[in-house]
Image: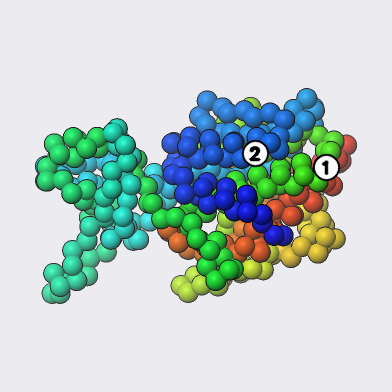
Amino acid sequence: MKFNKTSIKFLENYLNTSSPTGFEHNGQKAWTEYIKPYVDKIEVDNYGTAYGIINPEAEFKVVIEAHADEISWYVNYITDEGFIYVIRNGGSDQVIAPSKVVDIHGEKGVVKGVFGWPAIHTRANQNEPTPKLDNIFIDCGATSKQEVEDLGIFVGCMITYPDTFFELNDRYFVCRALDNRIGGFMIAEVARLLQENKKKLPFGLYITNSVQEEVGLYGAEMIADTIKPNIAIVTDVTHDTTTPMIEKKKEGDQKCGNGPVVFFAPSVHHTIRELIIDTAKKKKIPFQRAAASRATGTDTDAFAHSNGGVPSALISLPLRYMHTTVEMVSKEDVGNVIQLIYETLLKIKPDMNLKYY
């Protein structure tokens, strides 16, 4: 699948827009503006989960879902000398922090800062320090706590990385927050394809971009209770396990460029999963398989366990360097995930048998 210029422009803008957990509104505004021409109705819930609806009057409801939030940091403590200590908002990795530039979202606007780290010369005759929450700190150029606060920075302010989107070797998309705004992009493209190809669905389709996945699947839990879908197909990212220092015996064997990853897990409904696999085979869409022992760790679990049990499935996108600022995905895989969700939707019927056995 080839992406048009408008799609790529949206993807770049969407990824470059900060959307940390609990503060997803700017990203959601960009997303809803893009999908507006492709849906009949747009809704936003009390905590910011946004969804576009095709055929909103239909009784049978199908959700395709991604999550909108990215990991970040909170200002937690400001020293008398003006240094800022942080706590996580989601699974932020302290190891990558030293020497990174950050955006501090203060009350007077965005303030630049850096995660400082002692020079290699000063660490010569001591045990090499490891970045940890209690020793990483941000320097915003202030010399006192008062100066920090005069900049509009207080405890509770959000901190994000400003790293922006680019393409690598004409093969990969690279950016922070591909986990999982690339999912929001993919479900938006499904909506675009349905509209441009003039496909009429025999059910209501809810293109859903949930908040607060990174801190516990909370947005999906809330919106599942609101929509009460009959079927949910979730897309998220999973690990490319072919890069150095990853144990395949533990993490499985998935690779960027080898296609979407279809998950096997207790929360994944057999009928929906087999429909996806059958669609991939018939449409010659490459795919991989992966297993999760207890939970997928994605919004699939929230939908599956809601409303007495919603038949749900997970199509994941292989990704390198998760929860860093250089997350990478294969452009070809992105196109194949979009195509697989699109083709699967065309096979869903309101009268299909969803019984477990």
- Pointer 2: residues within 10 angstroms few (<14), some, or many (20+)? many
Query: How many marks do you count on the picture?
Result: 2
Q: N-terminal of the two: label 2 or label 1?
A: 2
Query: Can residue 217 be seen from the camera position used here?
Result: no
Render colour scheme:
rainbow
Q: Which mark is residue 300?
A: none
Q: Relative to 31, is 238 above or below?
A: below
Q: Residue at x 44, y 36 (%)?
A: 22
Query: Can residue 162 be seen from the camera position used here?
Result: yes
Q: Residue at x 82, y 60 (%)?
A: 283
Q: Position of residue 72 (x, y in %)?
A: 39, 47
To which residue does mark 1 refer?
199
Label 1, secondary structure: give it.
loop
Question: Residue 184 versus residue 275: which sits nearer the camera?
Answer: 184
To which residue does mark 2 refer?
35
Query: In the visual, does 269 lie left or right of 46?
Result: right
